[in-house]
Image (tube, rainbow, N blue to C red):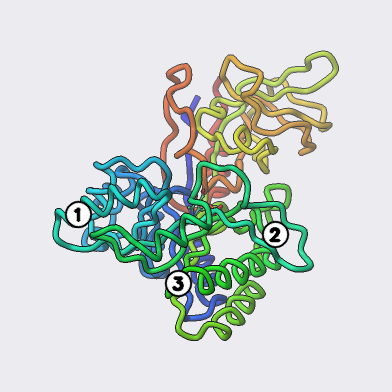
Amino acid sequence: MTRPVYVHDLDGLASHAQFIRAALPRRVELLYAVKANPDPGVLQTLAPIVDGFETASRGELRRMAEALPGRPPAAYAGPGKTDEDLAAALSARVDRIHVESPAELRRLGALAAAAGTPAQVLLRVNLPVDTPGVHLVMGGGPSPFGMNPEDAVQCAARPPAGIEVRGVHAHLASGLDAPLAGAVAAAVVRWSVTNVGAEEVDIGGGMAVDYADPTARFDWVSYGRALNDVLDAHPGLRLRVEPGRSVTAYCGAYVVEVVDVKRSHGEWFVVVAGGTHHLRTPAAKGHSQPFTVHRRRGADGPHSDGGPVTIVGQLCTPKDVLSRSATAGPIGVGDIVVFAMAGAYAWNISHRDFLLHEPPEFRTGDPLRVASQWAARPHQS
Ligand SMILES: Cc1ncc(COP(=O)(O)O)c(C=O)c1O
Protein backbone atom coordinates (compact mmCIF):
# COMPACT_ATOMS: atom_id res chain seq x y z
CA MET A 1 0.00 0.00 0.00
CA THR A 2 1.51 3.31 -1.07
CA ARG A 3 1.15 6.44 1.01
CA PRO A 4 -1.35 9.02 -0.24
CA VAL A 5 0.13 11.84 -2.30
CA TYR A 6 -0.70 15.53 -2.54
CA VAL A 7 0.12 16.80 -6.03
CA HIS A 8 0.38 20.52 -6.77
CA ASP A 9 0.05 21.59 -10.40
CA LEU A 10 2.23 24.70 -10.19
CA ASP A 11 2.07 25.45 -13.93
CA GLY A 12 -1.74 25.38 -13.74
CA LEU A 13 -1.58 27.63 -10.68
CA ALA A 14 0.66 30.13 -12.49
CA SER A 15 -1.66 30.39 -15.49
CA HIS A 16 -4.77 30.69 -13.29
CA ALA A 17 -3.15 33.44 -11.21
CA GLN A 18 -1.97 35.24 -14.38
CA PHE A 19 -5.54 35.13 -15.66
CA ILE A 20 -6.82 36.65 -12.40
CA ARG A 21 -4.14 39.35 -12.47
CA ALA A 22 -5.00 40.25 -16.07
CA ALA A 23 -8.75 40.40 -15.32
CA LEU A 24 -8.33 42.95 -12.53
CA PRO A 25 -7.54 46.62 -13.15
CA ARG A 26 -3.78 47.22 -12.92
CA ARG A 27 -4.37 49.67 -10.07
CA VAL A 28 -5.94 46.95 -7.91
CA GLU A 29 -3.31 45.26 -5.76
CA LEU A 30 -3.79 41.49 -5.80
CA LEU A 31 -2.66 39.90 -2.53
CA TYR A 32 -2.73 36.16 -1.91
CA ALA A 33 -4.13 35.03 1.48
CA VAL A 34 -1.38 32.66 2.65
CA LYS A 35 -3.80 30.87 5.02
CA ALA A 36 -5.42 29.14 2.02
CA ASN A 37 -2.23 27.20 1.22
CA PRO A 38 1.18 28.18 2.63
CA ASP A 39 3.10 25.53 0.66
CA PRO A 40 6.51 27.04 -0.26
CA GLY A 41 6.17 26.00 -3.92
CA VAL A 42 2.75 27.67 -4.09
CA LEU A 43 4.13 30.90 -2.58
CA GLN A 44 7.15 30.90 -4.92
CA THR A 45 4.93 30.27 -7.95
CA LEU A 46 2.63 33.15 -7.04
CA ALA A 47 5.44 35.55 -6.08
CA PRO A 48 6.11 37.00 -9.56
CA ILE A 49 2.36 37.27 -10.35
CA VAL A 50 0.69 38.75 -7.28
CA ASP A 51 1.40 42.13 -5.74
CA GLY A 52 1.86 40.75 -2.26
CA PHE A 53 0.89 38.30 0.45
CA GLU A 54 -1.55 38.57 3.34
CA THR A 55 -0.36 36.78 6.48
CA ALA A 56 -2.21 36.09 9.72
CA SER A 57 0.20 34.42 12.16
CA ARG A 58 3.83 34.33 13.19
CA GLY A 59 4.02 30.93 11.53
CA GLU A 60 2.98 32.49 8.23
CA LEU A 61 5.55 35.28 8.72
CA ARG A 62 8.23 32.61 9.23
CA ARG A 63 7.04 30.67 6.18
CA MET A 64 7.19 33.83 4.05
CA ALA A 65 10.70 34.63 5.29
CA GLU A 66 11.86 31.09 4.43
CA ALA A 67 10.08 30.76 1.06
CA LEU A 68 10.54 34.33 -0.15
CA PRO A 69 13.43 35.91 1.76
CA GLY A 70 13.60 39.68 1.36
CA ARG A 71 9.94 40.03 0.44
CA PRO A 72 8.03 41.44 3.45
CA PRO A 73 4.33 40.52 3.52
CA ALA A 74 1.89 43.16 2.33
CA ALA A 75 -0.50 42.61 5.23
CA TYR A 76 -0.73 41.03 8.67
CA ALA A 77 -4.25 40.30 9.91
CA GLY A 78 -6.26 38.02 12.18
CA PRO A 79 -8.11 38.20 15.48
CA GLY A 80 -6.35 37.69 18.83
CA LYS A 81 -2.94 39.07 17.97
CA THR A 82 -0.62 38.89 20.97
CA ASP A 83 2.07 41.49 21.65
CA GLU A 84 4.57 38.94 20.29
CA ASP A 85 2.55 38.69 17.07
CA LEU A 86 2.37 42.48 16.69
CA ALA A 87 6.10 42.89 17.43
CA ALA A 88 6.90 40.17 14.88
CA ALA A 89 4.78 41.94 12.24
CA LEU A 90 6.59 45.22 12.96
CA SER A 91 10.03 43.67 12.74
CA ALA A 92 9.09 41.76 9.55
CA ARG A 93 8.33 45.20 8.04
CA VAL A 94 4.83 44.15 7.01
CA ASP A 95 3.42 46.91 4.81
CA ARG A 96 0.02 47.19 6.55
CA ILE A 97 -1.17 45.74 9.86
CA HIS A 98 -4.93 45.12 9.97
CA VAL A 99 -6.19 45.94 13.44
CA GLU A 100 -9.23 44.16 14.85
CA SER A 101 -10.17 46.21 17.95
CA PRO A 102 -9.47 49.53 19.71
CA ALA A 103 -7.54 47.65 22.43
CA GLU A 104 -5.33 45.96 19.83
CA LEU A 105 -4.70 49.36 18.25
CA ARG A 106 -3.50 50.77 21.60
CA ARG A 107 -1.13 47.81 22.15
CA LEU A 108 0.26 48.14 18.63
CA GLY A 109 0.70 51.90 19.11
CA ALA A 110 2.74 51.35 22.29
CA LEU A 111 4.99 48.79 20.57
CA ALA A 112 5.48 50.95 17.48
CA ALA A 113 6.17 54.09 19.55
CA ALA A 114 8.79 52.16 21.55
CA ALA A 115 10.37 50.97 18.29
CA GLY A 116 10.42 54.56 17.00
CA THR A 117 8.55 53.91 13.72
CA PRO A 118 4.78 54.47 13.39
CA ALA A 119 2.75 51.41 12.41
CA GLN A 120 0.85 51.74 9.12
CA VAL A 121 -2.62 50.45 9.85
CA LEU A 122 -5.89 49.48 8.22
CA LEU A 123 -8.83 49.19 10.64
CA ARG A 124 -10.80 46.01 10.14
CA VAL A 125 -14.44 47.05 10.27
CA ASN A 126 -17.51 44.84 10.71
CA LEU A 127 -19.81 46.75 8.39
CA PRO A 128 -23.55 46.34 7.88
CA VAL A 129 -23.15 46.42 4.12
CA ASP A 130 -26.27 47.70 2.44
CA THR A 131 -26.24 47.00 -1.30
CA PRO A 132 -29.36 48.26 -3.07
CA GLY A 133 -31.07 45.51 -5.03
CA VAL A 134 -29.01 42.76 -3.43
CA HIS A 135 -30.31 40.66 -0.58
CA LEU A 136 -27.19 40.41 1.53
CA VAL A 137 -27.26 39.21 5.10
CA MET A 138 -23.71 39.75 6.29
CA GLY A 139 -21.77 42.08 8.53
CA GLY A 140 -23.41 44.26 11.08
CA GLY A 141 -24.01 41.33 13.45
CA PRO A 142 -22.07 40.21 16.53
CA SER A 143 -18.74 38.74 15.43
CA PRO A 144 -15.19 38.28 16.75
CA PHE A 145 -13.88 39.85 13.54
CA GLY A 146 -13.19 43.54 13.20
CA MET A 147 -14.50 46.53 15.11
CA ASN A 148 -17.85 48.26 15.09
CA PRO A 149 -18.15 51.10 12.58
CA GLU A 150 -18.46 53.76 15.29
CA ASP A 151 -15.26 52.48 16.98
CA ALA A 152 -13.44 52.63 13.65
CA VAL A 153 -14.57 56.22 13.11
CA GLN A 154 -13.21 57.17 16.56
CA CYS A 155 -9.92 55.26 16.08
CA ALA A 156 -9.36 56.98 12.74
CA ALA A 157 -10.17 60.43 14.14
CA ARG A 158 -7.96 60.04 17.26
CA PRO A 159 -5.37 57.30 16.68
CA PRO A 160 -3.07 56.47 19.60
CA ALA A 161 0.59 57.54 19.47
CA GLY A 162 2.62 55.27 17.20
CA ILE A 163 -0.24 54.66 14.75
CA GLU A 164 -0.94 56.01 11.28
CA VAL A 165 -4.40 54.95 10.09
CA ARG A 166 -4.35 54.56 6.31
CA GLY A 167 -7.81 53.17 5.79
CA VAL A 168 -10.11 50.20 6.15
CA HIS A 169 -9.98 46.44 5.81
CA ALA A 170 -13.22 44.45 5.45
CA HIS A 171 -13.39 40.72 4.80
CA LEU A 172 -17.11 40.15 5.28
CA ALA A 173 -17.97 36.77 3.82
CA SER A 174 -16.91 33.71 1.86
CA GLY A 175 -18.57 32.31 -1.22
CA LEU A 176 -19.45 35.59 -2.93
CA ASP A 177 -20.21 35.43 -6.62
CA ALA A 178 -18.86 38.21 -8.82
CA PRO A 179 -21.94 40.52 -8.83
CA LEU A 180 -22.22 40.27 -5.05
CA ALA A 181 -18.49 40.73 -4.49
CA GLY A 182 -18.55 43.80 -6.75
CA ALA A 183 -21.51 45.27 -4.87
CA VAL A 184 -19.81 44.62 -1.51
CA ALA A 185 -16.60 46.28 -2.74
CA ALA A 186 -18.50 49.38 -3.83
CA ALA A 187 -20.39 49.59 -0.54
CA VAL A 188 -17.29 49.07 1.63
CA VAL A 189 -15.30 51.68 -0.27
CA ARG A 190 -18.17 54.19 -0.15
CA TRP A 191 -18.48 53.77 3.63
CA SER A 192 -14.70 53.90 4.21
CA VAL A 193 -14.10 57.05 2.19
CA THR A 194 -17.12 58.85 3.62
CA ASN A 195 -16.76 57.92 7.30
CA VAL A 196 -13.05 57.34 7.85
CA GLY A 197 -11.56 59.41 5.05
CA ALA A 198 -9.80 56.21 3.91
CA GLU A 199 -6.99 56.57 1.36
CA GLU A 200 -6.74 52.78 1.17
CA VAL A 201 -9.26 49.96 1.32
CA ASP A 202 -8.61 46.21 1.41
CA ILE A 203 -11.86 44.46 0.54
CA GLY A 204 -10.69 40.99 1.56
CA GLY A 205 -11.21 37.66 -0.19
CA GLY A 206 -14.16 35.28 -0.16
CA MET A 207 -14.62 34.83 -3.93
CA ALA A 208 -16.83 31.79 -4.55
CA VAL A 209 -15.47 28.32 -5.29
CA ASP A 210 -18.09 25.76 -6.35
CA TYR A 211 -17.00 22.28 -5.24
CA ALA A 212 -20.09 20.79 -6.91
CA ASP A 213 -18.83 21.97 -10.30
CA PRO A 214 -15.03 21.70 -10.68
CA THR A 215 -15.20 23.42 -14.08
CA ALA A 216 -16.89 26.57 -12.73
CA ARG A 217 -14.76 29.61 -11.92
CA PHE A 218 -15.42 32.92 -10.19
CA ASP A 219 -16.10 35.52 -12.89
CA TRP A 220 -12.90 37.57 -12.49
CA VAL A 221 -13.56 39.55 -15.67
CA SER A 222 -16.89 41.00 -14.53
CA TYR A 223 -15.49 41.49 -11.01
CA GLY A 224 -12.61 43.43 -12.59
CA ARG A 225 -15.13 45.65 -14.39
CA ALA A 226 -16.96 46.31 -11.09
CA LEU A 227 -13.66 47.28 -9.41
CA ASN A 228 -12.89 49.56 -12.33
CA ASP A 229 -16.14 51.41 -11.63
CA VAL A 230 -15.16 51.70 -7.96
CA LEU A 231 -11.77 53.16 -8.91
CA ASP A 232 -13.39 55.59 -11.38
CA ALA A 233 -15.58 56.87 -8.54
CA HIS A 234 -12.54 57.22 -6.21
CA PRO A 235 -9.54 58.20 -8.38
CA GLY A 236 -6.96 58.56 -5.57
CA LEU A 237 -7.87 55.35 -3.77
CA ARG A 238 -5.41 52.48 -3.17
CA LEU A 239 -7.50 49.30 -3.48
CA ARG A 240 -6.47 45.79 -2.45
CA VAL A 241 -8.10 42.37 -2.70
CA GLU A 242 -6.84 39.28 -0.86
CA PRO A 243 -8.37 36.06 -2.22
CA GLY A 244 -7.11 32.66 -1.08
CA ARG A 245 -9.40 29.74 -1.93
CA SER A 246 -10.33 30.96 -5.41
CA VAL A 247 -6.61 31.22 -6.30
CA THR A 248 -5.25 27.85 -5.15
CA ALA A 249 -8.23 25.47 -4.76
CA TYR A 250 -7.85 24.13 -8.31
CA CYS A 251 -4.09 23.50 -8.26
CA GLY A 252 -4.05 20.71 -5.69
CA ALA A 253 -5.15 17.08 -5.74
CA TYR A 254 -5.10 14.39 -3.07
CA VAL A 255 -4.39 10.98 -4.58
CA VAL A 256 -5.21 7.82 -2.61
CA GLU A 257 -5.61 4.07 -3.06
CA VAL A 258 -8.78 2.08 -2.33
CA VAL A 259 -8.18 -0.42 0.46
CA ASP A 260 -11.67 -1.90 0.88
CA VAL A 261 -15.05 -1.87 -0.84
CA LYS A 262 -18.15 -3.16 0.91
CA ARG A 263 -21.89 -3.04 1.06
CA SER A 264 -23.49 -1.94 4.32
CA HIS A 265 -27.26 -2.18 4.78
CA GLY A 266 -27.88 -1.63 1.10
CA GLU A 267 -25.26 1.13 0.48
CA TRP A 268 -21.77 0.89 -1.07
CA PHE A 269 -18.80 2.15 0.91
CA VAL A 270 -15.32 2.66 -0.55
CA VAL A 271 -12.57 2.90 2.08
CA VAL A 272 -9.38 4.66 1.00
CA ALA A 273 -5.97 4.53 2.67
CA GLY A 274 -6.14 8.15 3.84
CA GLY A 275 -9.01 10.36 4.96
CA THR A 276 -10.10 13.68 6.38
CA HIS A 277 -7.01 13.83 8.60
CA HIS A 278 -5.20 14.65 5.33
CA LEU A 279 -8.03 16.37 3.44
CA ARG A 280 -10.31 18.12 5.90
CA THR A 281 -12.03 20.35 3.34
CA PRO A 282 -15.15 18.15 2.82
CA ALA A 283 -15.62 17.72 6.59
CA ALA A 284 -15.05 21.42 7.28
CA LYS A 285 -17.39 22.64 4.55
CA GLY A 286 -19.89 19.77 4.59
CA HIS A 287 -19.57 18.95 0.91
CA SER A 288 -18.54 15.97 -1.22
CA GLN A 289 -15.05 16.43 -2.61
CA PRO A 290 -15.06 15.97 -6.42
CA PHE A 291 -13.04 12.98 -7.59
CA THR A 292 -12.11 10.77 -10.52
CA VAL A 293 -11.14 7.09 -10.42
CA HIS A 294 -8.24 5.33 -12.14
CA ARG A 295 -8.84 1.60 -12.53
CA ARG A 296 -5.92 -0.41 -11.17
CA ARG A 297 -3.93 -2.80 -13.30
CA GLY A 298 -4.37 -6.34 -12.04
CA ALA A 299 -6.92 -5.39 -9.39
CA ASP A 300 -9.41 -8.25 -9.29
CA GLY A 301 -10.72 -7.84 -5.73
CA PRO A 302 -14.15 -6.65 -4.65
CA HIS A 303 -15.68 -3.70 -6.46
CA SER A 304 -18.88 -1.70 -6.29
CA ASP A 305 -21.70 -2.25 -8.77
CA GLY A 306 -21.37 1.15 -10.48
CA GLY A 307 -24.13 2.75 -8.41
CA PRO A 308 -23.66 5.50 -5.81
CA VAL A 309 -20.78 5.05 -3.34
CA THR A 310 -19.73 6.85 -0.19
CA ILE A 311 -15.96 7.27 0.03
CA VAL A 312 -14.56 7.22 3.54
CA GLY A 313 -11.13 7.23 5.14
CA GLN A 314 -9.40 5.20 7.85
CA LEU A 315 -10.46 7.18 10.91
CA CYS A 316 -12.63 5.65 13.64
CA THR A 317 -15.40 8.21 13.24
CA PRO A 318 -18.47 8.31 11.00
CA LYS A 319 -17.45 11.88 10.14
CA ASP A 320 -14.48 10.68 8.09
CA VAL A 321 -16.39 11.06 4.80
CA LEU A 322 -14.67 12.43 1.70
CA SER A 323 -17.60 12.06 -0.69
CA ARG A 324 -21.16 10.94 -0.08
CA SER A 325 -23.42 9.01 -2.48
CA ALA A 326 -21.54 9.86 -5.66
CA THR A 327 -21.87 7.84 -8.85
CA ALA A 328 -18.57 7.12 -10.61
CA GLY A 329 -18.89 3.65 -12.15
CA PRO A 330 -17.59 0.50 -10.44
CA ILE A 331 -14.77 1.16 -7.92
CA GLY A 332 -12.53 -1.69 -6.81
CA VAL A 333 -9.87 -2.43 -4.20
CA GLY A 334 -6.53 -1.12 -5.47
CA ASP A 335 -8.07 1.60 -7.65
CA ILE A 336 -6.64 5.11 -7.39
CA VAL A 337 -8.94 7.97 -6.46
CA VAL A 338 -7.93 11.54 -7.34
CA PHE A 339 -9.70 14.12 -5.19
CA ALA A 340 -9.62 17.40 -7.11
CA MET A 341 -9.87 20.96 -5.77
CA ALA A 342 -7.59 20.12 -2.85
CA GLY A 343 -5.29 23.12 -3.20
CA ALA A 344 -6.88 25.38 -0.56
CA TYR A 345 -7.74 24.82 3.11
CA ALA A 346 -6.86 21.15 2.57
CA TRP A 347 -3.72 19.57 4.11
CA ASN A 348 -2.96 22.80 5.98
CA ILE A 349 -6.24 22.73 7.96
CA SER A 350 -6.35 18.96 8.53
CA HIS A 351 -6.18 17.16 11.89
CA ARG A 352 -3.10 15.46 10.64
CA ASP A 353 -2.15 13.50 13.75
CA PHE A 354 -5.54 11.78 14.12
CA LEU A 355 -4.78 8.07 14.82
CA LEU A 356 -1.11 8.83 14.07
CA HIS A 357 -1.51 7.66 10.46
CA GLU A 358 1.40 8.41 8.15
CA PRO A 359 1.27 11.79 6.39
CA PRO A 360 0.87 11.98 2.59
CA GLU A 361 3.83 12.59 0.30
CA PHE A 362 4.10 15.84 -1.63
CA ARG A 363 4.95 16.12 -5.32
CA THR A 364 4.54 18.62 -8.10
CA GLY A 365 3.14 17.90 -11.55
CA ASP A 366 -0.04 16.64 -13.13
CA PRO A 367 -2.23 14.74 -10.59
CA LEU A 368 -3.88 12.59 -13.27
CA ARG A 369 -0.46 11.52 -14.57
CA VAL A 370 0.60 10.59 -11.04
CA ALA A 371 -2.62 8.60 -10.65
CA SER A 372 -2.30 6.76 -13.96
CA GLN A 373 1.37 5.85 -13.28
CA TRP A 374 0.30 4.59 -9.87
CA ALA A 375 -2.63 2.67 -11.36
CA ALA A 376 -0.24 1.03 -13.87
CA ARG A 377 1.76 -0.54 -11.05
CA PRO A 378 0.44 -4.06 -10.31
CA HIS A 379 -1.87 -4.18 -7.32
CA GLN A 380 -0.69 -5.87 -4.14
CA SER A 381 -2.93 -5.78 -1.10
C1 LIG B 1 -9.05 38.42 6.61
C2 LIG B 1 -9.14 37.41 5.53
N1 LIG B 1 -8.71 37.74 4.30
C3 LIG B 1 -8.76 36.85 3.27
C4 LIG B 1 -9.26 35.58 3.47
C5 LIG B 1 -9.28 34.64 2.31
O1 LIG B 1 -10.57 34.24 2.02
P1 LIG B 1 -10.85 33.23 0.82
O2 LIG B 1 -9.89 32.13 0.96
O3 LIG B 1 -12.27 32.81 1.03
O4 LIG B 1 -10.67 34.00 -0.45
C6 LIG B 1 -9.73 35.21 4.73
C7 LIG B 1 -10.27 33.86 4.97
O5 LIG B 1 -10.66 33.48 6.03
C8 LIG B 1 -9.67 36.15 5.80
O6 LIG B 1 -10.09 35.84 7.03
Which numbered tag is attached to residue 62?
none
Which residue is painted at 33% across and 61% down in the image?
A: 159
Q: Quadrant of residue 16?
A: bottom right
* Mark 3 neighbour density, 10 Å: few (under 14) some (14–19) many (20 or more): many
Q: Is residue 19 left or right of residue 122?
A: right
Q: Residue 220 at x, y = what percent?
A: 62, 70
Q: SS class of the residue under badge 2?
A: loop
Amino acid at pointer 3: Ala
Which residue is painted at 73% across and 18% down in the image?
A: 262
Q: Quadrant of residue 261?
A: top right
Q: CA distance from mark 1 to mark 3?
A: 25 Å
Amino acid at pointer 2: Ala
Can you identify the residue that label 1 sits on?
91
* Mark 2 neighbour density, 10 Å: few (under 14) some (14–19) many (20 or more): few
Amino acid at pointer 1: Ser
- Depth check: 372 or 81 in front? 81
1 or 2: mark nearer the eye? 1
Q: CA distance from mark 1 to mark 2?
A: 41 Å
The answer to the question of whether label 1 and label 3 lie on touching residues, with beta carbons closer than 8 A, is: no
Can you identify the residue that label 3 sits on?
198
Q: Is residue 375 left or right of residue 196?
A: right
1 or 3: mark nearer the eye? 3
Q: Residue 289 at x, y = what percent?
A: 66, 40
* Mark 1 neighbour density, 10 Å: few (under 14) some (14–19) many (20 or more): few
> Along the polypeptide, which appears first: circle 2 or circle 3?
3
Q: SS class of the residue under badge 1?
A: helix
Q: Quadrant of residue 311?
A: top right
- Depth check: 327 or 128 in front? 128
Can you identify the residue that label 2 sits on?
216
Is disc 3's CB within 8 Å of ligand 1?
Answer: no
Q: Residue 130 at x, y = what percent?
A: 69, 63
Q: Residue 20 at x, y = what percent?
A: 54, 70
